[in-house]
Structure formats: structure tokens, C-alpha cells
Image: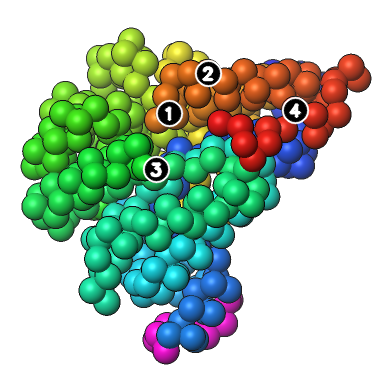
Amino acid sequence: MAKQKTNGETVLPEPISFEVFQALPKSDLHVHLDGSLRLSTILDIAKKGGIELPADTEEGLRQAIGCGKVFGSLVEYLRGFDITLRVMQTEESLERIAFELAEDAHLENVRYMEVRYSPMLHTQKNLKLTKVVEAVLDGLRRARETYGIKANVILCGIRNISTESSYEMAELAVAYKGRGVVGFDLAGAEADNPAKHHKQAFQLVRDNNINCTIHAGEAYGPESVAQAIHVCGAHRIGHGVRLRESGDLLHYVNDHRIPLECCPSSNVQTGAVRDLKNHPIKLYFDLGLRVTVNTDNRLITDTSVSKELYLVHKEMGMSFADIKSLILSGFKSAFRPFHEKQAAMRRVLAELNRYDDHGRLRTDAPPLDSARPTAAVG
């Protein structure tokens, strides 16, 4: 967003309205299932299942989870998951929550998403791991049949649990390759839990030609990003805000076109950055890195993809032309077959080209619905 001078003072033009960002086609490559529930759904499942919660109203639950709160550390941020996971222990609840997540995404015009979670966290009532995976896939499949939104799954190992459990999650990813699972991730408390300890799990998925992404450079420095790439073979990096501390590694990531899954508001919540204006996403973009914008956790961060893009524009001063490039990078970085990805990008580019660089619909643009894909596409 170019700066203008008025009466000797440097000012920014009025930001483009939030409604424009809602209308744009979008992707969400970094969104956690267990951090993206509806408050009403948590209360409903808990009531039907006799599950104890710290509050019995949406506002009370919002306060208990800390939705949108600045926690100051990743460990504190993760405590909210103790509440959400209580209602995610049956096939019915998992199918419903997965469907509702995709439905919420569809309502803000997200066309493609990759939903990540760790099946081992949903076995408190002895639900089989295979049943966990299939329930989530069923929910996402129902959403696609209903709305046309395409959603795949990334399974996660957890840094701070055990290497054995991560390997078991990797085995699940192999078993469900080609059936809706498109990647493997390592999540959880980053500090003091290096990715290199989980090397065998990543070796297994890479041996089976499965994509890898790793949370790195969020609560620990660039060494964590280096391990994710060089030891575990990550194809994308989750967050990566501290990559800027190593220019050499930053240029390596850029040269090798390794996408960064940026989640700006979440990074403020966890203390990875002081505030949005200090987020490195604009620096990365200006240097040419492949940057994507994502939600991380829709509930706990109290956000949407539209909101994140709007904040990147409004708070960080990125132009609308840059925003369109960020959106394209999301579709370009998806864990999808090349030709499928290429077709999706052509459709999205055609839609984005309907807007000028000021966020206005071009006078010669086709009607909004004419560029929308049908449920059978992609």
C-alpha cells in the first residue's frame, strides 16, 4: 500500500473494506481441527455427553479458552486445547466438527484447505485411530458434497509426547495416503523438543512420497527451521517467524521455494512477535519468499482467513496487489497433484483479475457467480 504525503505528513490511504477480502477466493493450509470448533458445538456435545466444562455459556467458554487473548507463550496458548479435546472423542463429534470447520471456511469463500490434527489425541475413550481418521474424512467429504469446498488432511506427530507415537501417526499417514491424507506434520511445544528426535517418522513418510510440513521457528530460533528442512526434509514450514534471524538460512529457503505457512494473529498470541506491525511477513514477501496466510486456530485465535488477509493489508501496509499474490501462493503451495493445483490456480487467478489494485470490481468483470467452481471441480 503506497504511502502518500499530505501537508508534510506521511499517511496511508484508507484500507480496502473487509467485505472485499471475504469475497476473494482463498485457501487455508495451516488450520488445526482441535483449535477451530464452534463454541455452540462444544457446549452442545458436552451437554449431550455429560462432559464437564469450565463454563456453561459461550461467553464463559470464550474466556476459559482465551479466544483472541495474547498469552505470551506457545505453552500457555496450547492450554485451550485441553478444553476442546474433551468433546472430540467420538466418531459423531469428530465428523460434525470437521464438517462445521469446512462449512465455516466455505462461508468466507475458502476454496481449499488442509486440516491438521493428531489422531492419538482423540482416543481418550478408546476410539481406534483408524476410526478417528475416517470420521474426520467423512465430515470433510460431506462438506465437499454439500458446498463444493475441497479439504484434505495433514496428520500430526506431537513433539512433546514421544517419538514412538509420532512414528505411529506417520504409519497412519502412509495407510491413508491417496484417501484424503496429503501430508505429515510435527506440532506441539517447540522449545526443548527438537524435530531431529522425530527423524524416523519423517523418513517413513518421505520414503512413501508423502509431503511434510513442520512447525518451526515459532517458539525457537532458526536452528529449528534448519532441522525441519535438513534433518526431517520438510517441504513447507509452519510459522517460521524467527527465520529472519538467519539471513543465510532465509536465502536458502527462498532459493529452494520452501513455502512459509504464516499465521499472523496467532504469532502475536503466542509471543512469537510483539505485534502485527513487527511480523516479518512483509519482509519475507518483499525478499521474494513464498509466503502463505493462514488461520492456525479459528476458535482460539478468533479469526478467519479473510480477517488475517485484511490485517496484513491494514496493519502491515501490504497493497491489494500483494494480497492477491499471497492468495495465489496459498494455492501454489498446496499439497495437491500438480495438474489439479494448476487448474485451481487458473480459476483463482481469473477471479482475482476481476479486481483492480484498489480492490474494486472491474467494470468489465463477469458476474461473481460465473467464476465460482462447482462441487464437482478440483
Tell me: 190 left or right of 49: left
Residue contact between numbered discs 1 and 4, judged by CB atoms under 8 Å: no
Tell me: 303 left or right of 334: right
Answer above or below: position of 129 versus 353. Answer: below
Q: Residue extending furthest right?
A: 363
Q: What type is the residue that disc 2 sits on?
A: Gln
Residue topped by disc 3: 180
Tell me: 84 left or right of 100: left
Q: Residue extending furthest bottom?
A: 50
Residue topped by disc 2: 342
- Is residue 69 magenta-colored? no
Which x, y percent locates residue 50? Answer: 42, 89
Q: What type is the residue that disc 1 sits on?
A: Arg
Q: What is the span of residues highlighted in magenta in the rendered image?
A: 50-60
Residue contact between numbered discs 4 and 3, judged by CB atoms under 8 Å: no
Q: Earlier in the sequence, mark 3 or mark 1?
A: 3
Q: What type is the residue that disc 3 sits on?
A: Gly
Q: Residues within 10 Å of mark 3 (few under 14, many from 20)?
A: many
Answer above or below: position of 207 versus 181. Answer: above
Residue topped by disc 1: 336
Tell me: 264 left or right of 270: right
